[in-house]
Image (cartoon, helix red, strand yellow):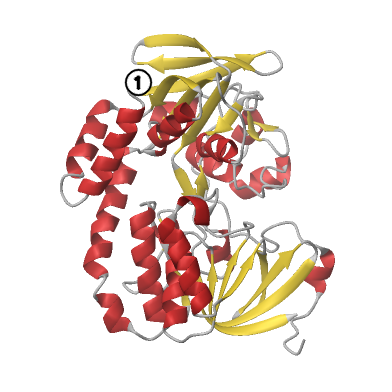
Amino acid sequence: MSMRVDLLVVGAGPAGLLAAATAAEAGRSVCLVDDNPSAGGQIWRSGIAEQNPEGLRLLRRLEAARAGMRFGWRAVAAPSSRVLRLEQSGQFADVEYSAIILATGARERFLPFPGWTLPGVYGAGGLQAFVKSGFDIRGKRVVVAGTGPLLLAVAAHLREAGARIVSVVEQAPLARLARFSLGLLRGQIGKLIEGAGYALHTAGIPYRTGAWVTSASGGERLENVTIRSGSRILEVPCDMLAIGYHLAPNTELPQLLDCDLHAGYVRVDELQQTSVSGIYCAGELTGIGGVDKAKVEGRIAALAACGQADRAKSLFRDRDRHRRFARHLDAAFALRDELRGLAMGSTLVCRCEDVPYDALAECGSWREAKLHTRCGMGPCQGRICAPAAEFLFGWKPPAPRPPLFPARVETLAHSTDRTA
């Protein structure tokens, strides 16, 4: 099966929804694709209609403009220029497009430490999503650790769901956090108020800055975490550890389409166009900056793709303000060097293929590590271990090759067919 549209939008989070709605209302034929079963992305994950009026309005705008929407479909390959191959439960479809906007968002960054693979250790955002989907966390003792503004948001949500938050552990030093908060007074008052709200909802919980989890221990599951806080070593009993070291952008699809990266993000011009003509990026792909940055970039990309550059330029000032916030965010929550020394020789770095730190330390590059240890060749295809290896060893992972996700041989072998 194949179809042709003026604009293909990949990713139905805030950036993708704004982009698709803007283009559809401009009279373009649009197809919005996301591998989740419904719209909303990570930020509106648990039910866009029930929990976010703005998201619901965007969906209604898309429906009114007769935009095509395919949820539960994954982009697995690009069989030819201006064609993206999608797959869902063994079925596949080729979408031919004149322009494409990539808004594939970001995922949590994990760093290996002794015990990080124990049952009971979760990604911070992952545990939040688990609870949103119905997991009962009432009465569980939880440590929330890592770095980034997500920690307080997760702690507030888990506490509201009935968890006993034992501590929030932030690796960034207090001085950096103070400078970051003061910087929000210049044009980001809304974010400062939002942060204050999370602080209010986590009042009374020990909040440790300049601190980090050095190990997790237990029998069949997590029982304790060890925390370094200044010169002190703390042993904290807990049932769950929610940990994440900020976010890593999902750049696999842009790289597959030959888009250039800079400093880990997709390089775009003032109209959000990448190094490849007709391919645009918006949201976390161009810099981790939150929902407001994502939305304005989605609109700019859509207007540019529709040939309305003048309208797009009217949004530049707003976007620049959110980009400054993104830069301040990166600086405030930059990872400290001490985190590189947490993994011991036997600590797994690649969980899919059971590759320990010692085996990788003998290698000189990501390619050599893959050849000798199979690191990055498991089901996650390096999405977890590659950012960790880049931080630990400075390796730049190569551009991904299709399929981006596991796919049927029939899907990959079938030639592009535009007549079906």
Is disc 1 surrounded by few (<14), some (14 to 19) or many (20+) residues within 10 Å? Answer: many
Residue 361 higher or lower than 88, as above or below: above
Residue 198 higher or lower than 342, as above or below: below
Q: Residue at x 18, y 52 (%)?
A: 187
Q: Quadrant of the N terminus?
A: bottom right
Q: Which residue is mark 1?
A: 208
Q: Position of residue 103 (x, y in %)?
A: 49, 63
Quarter of the view holding residue 360: top right
Asked whether 304 or 334 is in front, the reply is 304
Asked whether 169 or 72 is in front, the reply is 72
Asked whether 252 or 34 is in front, the reply is 34
In the current view of this chain or complex, which residue is farthest to the bottom? 419
Q: Is residue 390 visible?
A: yes
Q: Position of residue 315 (x, y in %)?
A: 26, 71
Q: Is residue 261 visible?
A: no
| Tag count | 1
Q: Position of residue 135 (x, y in %)?
A: 62, 33
Taking the image as shown, residue 285 lies to the left or right of residue 131, namely left
**Three-letter amino acid code of the residue under disc 1:** Arg
Q: Residue at x 59, y 33 (%)?
A: 361
